[in-house]
């Protein structure tokens, strides 16, 4: 069982992994902060009784631009981390931001996170999100993952263009 408390905030769930508990805890703090959240990697590791690398793992995999976050790390002072929720000024801003990101290519996980972000931002309906995920969650028959990522990025950009028009 994972149990962590800070003041009024407590995380408790027997099916939750440590990474899930850290994510939930940080999401709660980000919601409370309403803007940027500054936390100490060392203090988080001590609170969760884990290695700082576990905190890094959660930040690198769950607080990504595809999920609507920017993470900045400051050296010194105990490894301070700044978690900034990305804010958008309307649907067109969301679509343009994602369009630029898709240009680099997308893994299936990145594509799914972008679609989920479109859904949570109210840019697409649940049905549209499911259609997008279906189109992006396939292997395109290329010689490797890199080719698939580039093709997936082009497919995502085509869908975003259609949504922008």
Image (cartoon, helix red, strand yellow):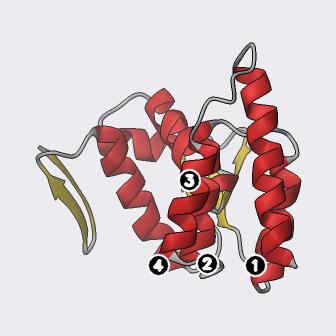
Q: How far apart are marks 1 and 3 (CA)?
A: 22 Å
Q: Which mark is residue 88?
A: 1
- Give me the residue at 77% from left, 86% from top: 90
**Position of 93 relative to 70 (above/below):** below
Relative image position of residue 159 (x, y in whole percent): 76, 61
Q: Do the residues labelled 1 and 2 touch (CB within 8 Å)?
A: yes
- Nearest to the eye among marks 1 and 2: give it: 2
* Label 1 Cα neighbours within 10 Å, binned few <14 / some 14-19 / many ≥20: few
Q: Distance between the residues labelled 4 and 2?
A: 19 Å
The quarter in which the C terminus is drawn is: bottom right
Q: Earlier in the sequence, mark 1 or mark 2?
A: 1
Q: Do the residues labelled 3 and 4 touch (CB within 8 Å)?
A: no
Left/right of residue 14 with respect to residue 56 in the rendered view: left
Residue 154, picture quadrant: top right
- Callout 3: helix, strand or loop? helix
**Position of 57 relative to 2 (above/below):** above
Relative image position of residue 13 (x, y in whole percent): 15, 53
Provide the residue designation for mark 4: 32
Q: How far apart are marks 3 and 2 (CA)?
A: 16 Å
- Residue in front for this viewpoint, 4 or 71: 71
Relative image position of residue 161 (x, y in whole percent): 86, 67
Q: Distance between the residues labelled 1 and 4?
A: 19 Å
Residue 49, picture quadrant: top left
Q: Which of marks 4 and 2 is nearer the N terminus?
A: 4
- Callout 2: helix, strand or loop? loop
Q: Do the residues labelled 1 and 3 touch (CB within 8 Å)?
A: no
- Nearest to the eye among marks 1 and 4: give it: 1
- Callout 1: helix, strand or loop? loop
Q: Earlier in the sequence, mark 3 or mark 4?
A: 4
Q: Residue 121 carries which label?
A: 2
Q: Which mark is residue 133?
A: 3
Residue 61 can be seen, yes or no: yes
């Amino acid at each position: 069982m994972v149990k962590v408390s800070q003041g009024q905030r407590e995380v408790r769930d027997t099916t939750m992994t440590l990474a899930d508990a850290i994510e939930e805890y940080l999401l709660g703090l980000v919601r409370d902060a309403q803007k940027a959240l500054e936390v100490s990697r060392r203090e988080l590791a001590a609170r969760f009784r884990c290695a700082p690398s576990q905190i890094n793992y959660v930040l690198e995999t769950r607080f990504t631009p595809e999920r609507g976050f920017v993470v900045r790390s400051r050296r010194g002072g105990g490894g301070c981390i700044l978690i900034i929720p990305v804010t958008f000024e309307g649907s067109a801003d969301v679509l343009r931001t994602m369009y630029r990101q898709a240009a680099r290519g997308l893994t299936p996980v990145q594509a799914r996170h972008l679609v989920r972000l479109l859904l949570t931002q109210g840019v697409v309906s649940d049905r549209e999100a499911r259609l997008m995920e279906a189109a992006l969650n396939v292997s395109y028959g290329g010689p490797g993952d890199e080719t698939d990522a580039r093709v997936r990025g082009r497919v995502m950009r085509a869908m975003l263009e259609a949504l922008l028009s």
